[in-house]
């Protein structure tokens, strides 16, 4: 049985088991009674305020994508609500799949294509938007790591490893935008550096990426003002994450300093880079570790659980949207196939 499983599947299972173990340990260390008590004290009104704030943040995510699509495709007017709900459907799929940052992107392409956007533009706009999201998140996390290096409790080896990792990620973000704006091509430069063109399978992948890369390069070069606006929107979205962490802790009776809120909203989010749905266990463990290192007296599991409850609302709404649109697509496809079948027999 194990021989039939490929390496990716085995790795996913290993990370999932690790995540479940960490999740259970987080519950055990926090104490079930303490978790229930904290959740009862966290009133419904406070939770609704958090959800409303998150909806505003999510609107910025969909607005960024809308700006990109409308810059690439001016032939048809698309409603902001369609971008919002399609973005949420993709988020829901990403959340419940191992690839938390990429799992829902094919669905995004399919949904926006169904709205009348050509496939090439649907794919390119999604890649541009996702690149902005991931690069901003990487910068945000890297800054959190660099700030954490000033903690005297970290040994020199840890500081070197963490500092090197953060510096490398920041350099890759810089190189991505530099090569895109200068029309060098990020993927093309990587292929040349690592001589990946010598590998046949990588040649085929390069051909597929080449078209999308050219589309991105054109967008960055021809829309410099829009790019700065999109970067500003991306900055606001990550600042919303910081604000949400500060508010959740405040509603739980803990006043975080700016530094504490910043570190707790950056470093733990490495969990979403792991091949585990929703960073299960990783996110709880990451927050618990950071809070302990900062001497913050807070129930880390209850803290993350409140955030997950908020996420569950988004996931539920997104899955409903995805199911509804998917059902309509399948229904239309069935009618088209049935019509073609009738024409053949007539």
Image: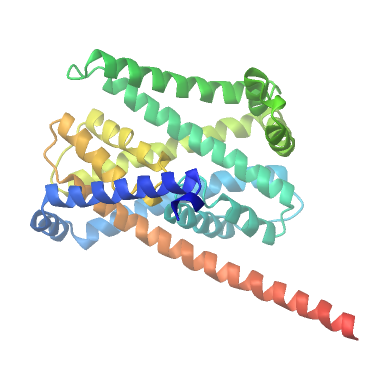
- Residue 131's quadrant in the figure? top right
- Point out the residue furthest to the bottom here: 346
Q: Position of residue 311 (x, y in %)?
A: 36, 55
Instruction: Please indicate whether residue 157 sits to the left or right of residue 141 in the image.
Output: left
Q: Quadrant of residue 334?
A: bottom right
Image spot of residue 150 (x, y percent): 25, 17
Q: Position of 247 compared to 119: left or right?
A: left
- Residue extending furthest right? 346
Could you tell me which quadrant the N terminus lies in? bottom left
Which residue is at the front of the view, 217 or 59?
217
Count of numbered labels shown in the rendering = 0
Q: Residue at x 16, y 38 (%)?
A: 255
Quadrant, the C terminus: bottom right
The structure residue drawn at horizontal position 66% and vertical position 25%, both measured from the top left corner, is: 196
When the figure is inspected, residue 191 is found, relative to residue 77, above or below; the finding is: above
What residue is drawn where x is 43% and y is 47%? 10
> Considering depth in this image, is 72 or 217 the residue closer to the camera?
217
Position of residue 128 measured from the top left corner of the image (x, y, whole percent): 61, 39
> Above or below — where is 325 with respect to 6?
below
The residue that appears at 25% across and 28% down in the rendered structure is 259
Q: How is the image coloured?
A: rainbow
**Nearer-the-camera pick, 44 or 37:** 37
Question: Where 109 sits versus 319, above or below?
Answer: above
Q: Position of residue 208 (x, y in %)?
A: 72, 39
């Amino acid at each position: 049985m194990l021989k039939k499983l490929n390496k990716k599947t085995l790795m996913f299972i290993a990370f999932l088991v690790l995540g479940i173990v960490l999740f259970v340990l987080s519950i055990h260390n926090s104490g079930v009674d303490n978790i229930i008590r904290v959740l009862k004290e966290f009133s419904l009104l406070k939770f609704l305020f958090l959800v409303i704030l998150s909806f505003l943040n999510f609107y910025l995510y969909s607005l960024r994508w809308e700006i990109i699509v409308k810059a690439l495709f001016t032939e048809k007017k698309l409603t902001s609500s369609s971008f919002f709900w399609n973005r949420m459907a993709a988020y829901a799929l990403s959340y419940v799949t191992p690839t938390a940052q990429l799992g829902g992107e094919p669905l995004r392409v399919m949904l926006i294509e169904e709205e009348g956007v050509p496939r090439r533009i649907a794919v390119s706009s999604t890649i541009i938007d996702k690149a902005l999201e991931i690069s901003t998140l990487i910068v945000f996390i890297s800054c959190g790591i660099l700030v954490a290096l000033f903690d005297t409790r970290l040994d020199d080896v840890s500081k070197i490893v963490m500092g090197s990792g953060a510096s490398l990620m920041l350099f890759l973000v810089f190189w991505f935008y530099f090569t895109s704006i200068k029309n060098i091509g990020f993927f093309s430069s990587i292929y040349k550096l690592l001589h990946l063109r010598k590998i046949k399978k990588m040649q085929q992948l390069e051909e597929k990426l080449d078209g999308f890369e050219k589309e991105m390069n054109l967008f960055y070069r021809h829309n410099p003002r829009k790019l700065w606006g999109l970067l500003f929107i991306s900055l606001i979205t990550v600042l919303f994450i910081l604000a949400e962490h500060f508010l959740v802790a405040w509603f739980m009776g803990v006043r975080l300093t700016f530094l504490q809120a910043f570190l707790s909203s950056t470093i733990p989010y490495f969990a979403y880079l792991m091949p585990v749905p929703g960073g299960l266990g990783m996110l709880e463990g990451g927050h618990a570790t950071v809070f302990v290192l900062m001497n913050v007296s807070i129930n880390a599991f209850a803290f993350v659980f409140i955030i997950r409850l908020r996420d569950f609302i988004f996931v539920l709404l997104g899955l409903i949207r995805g199911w509804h649109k998917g059902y309509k697509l399948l229904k239309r496809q069935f009618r088209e196939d049935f019509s073609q079948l009738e024409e053949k027999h007539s």
